[in-house]
Image: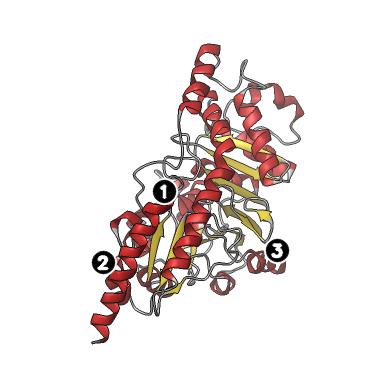
Amino acid sequence: MRRTEVYVIGDEEIEAVRRVINAGQLFRYRGGEGGETDKFEQEWAKLIGVQYALAMSSGTGALICGLVGLGVGPGDEVIVPGYTFMASALAVTAAGAVPILAEVDESLTIDPKDVERKITPRTKAIMPVYMLGLPADMDAIMGLAKKHGLRVLEDACQADGGSYKGRRLGSIGDVGGFSFNHFKILVCGEGGVLTTDEVTVYQRALVHHDGGTVFRGHAQHLQIPIWAGLNFRINEILSAILRVQLSRLETILAAVRREKRIMMEELGEVSGLTFSPIHDPEGDCGIHLALLFETEEEARVALAAIHPGLNAFIPLDTDRHVYTNWEPILKKRGAHHPRLDPFNLAEVPVRYSEDMLPQTLSVLGRSVCLMTSATREESELLEVLAATKRALSQRRLSRSL
């Protein structure tokens, strides 16, 4: 998936960086307490509507620490959709568990029916992923979790600020993970944050994300033992950028949602064109509009007709987001050493194959996604949409003849 520029970034972020550098405190601890990172965590927790937020160096780190926070480890299985960046599955192996791949449905999010088929006595958690800013069917997912006694980690890395039926994504399951790398709604180059309402989950994530926890002032207040953690710490420069980015969030979402509404109104006039189903249109981030076709051939005909200014793509072509390209997972190379490899620690061997999720491959091949912009003038959008409508109508007419 490509994007040539971030949504909105400017002088305010430059000034935030300048402020931190001039203060001379770039580290969040050992003098940085109460600074940019602590403030960002408080602001993010308030936005999402949770008790705790823990900023980190990446969205992947947030997912890993979220799984560790939930107590996921060797012998456990975590159900992950086959359409997501491979980091979703890699976070599972990093926690010592095995990812079980599930289908996505025509909404481009995890299929609850297939999730239930994939549940075993070894299943510990479900990881719905909000690809393209689209909320999953969280009523169904949470119902399955309650029915089978499972935990839910929301991968909201592509859905900063989205919601589902009035609740912010990242506040519905047991823990949420967000990303702020160059290709996300909010950006700081690379960064992430974990959200939860559970103090034990938060403290376990806190310990795991910072190998130096034992030396921090908050160590004496922890209710859990401190183990040998890693380093997913964020720094004050990135947090300062994120605080400015957070102030832009609602404006960005309003702009892209408006563009999506216009796209749907205009393209809805094209005979026979179908939009992919959305579980909560109001909560959808609005960063993409997905079209759904009966065949991949029809999707590719449509793709060729769409104006380049709409940055259209077929999800099946996005390589890194399709499970068939996850070589380390499909070949079960889960760690650098065999004694640490979760696939070698699994009670029951897992089997992967490139054709294991036929529904996913079909849906991804039959979908065409268009990108919205937070900064484009409406006149420019209407111009490229008009050209697209003409081309789509002509293509469909020529095929019918």
Image spot of residue 214 (x, y percent) = 65, 25
Q: Which mark is residue 149?
A: 3
* Residue at the farthest front position: 379
Task: Work out whether mark 1 precedes mark 3 in sequence or the reverse, and give the earlier one.
Answer: 3
222 to the left or right of 333: right
Q: Residue furthest toward the bottom? A: 401
- What amino acid does circle 2 point to? Ala
* Sequence-wise first label, 2 or 3: 3
Q: Nearer the viewer, mark 1 or mark 3?
A: 1
Q: Residues within 10 Å of mark 2 (few under 14, many from 20)?
A: some
* Residue position marked by numbered label 1 in the rendering: 377
**On screen, 70 above or below 54?**
below
Q: Quadrant of the C terminus?
A: bottom left
Q: Which mark is drawn over residue 304? A: 2
Residue drawn 63% across the image and 39% down it: 205
Q: Secondary structure at mark 2?
A: helix
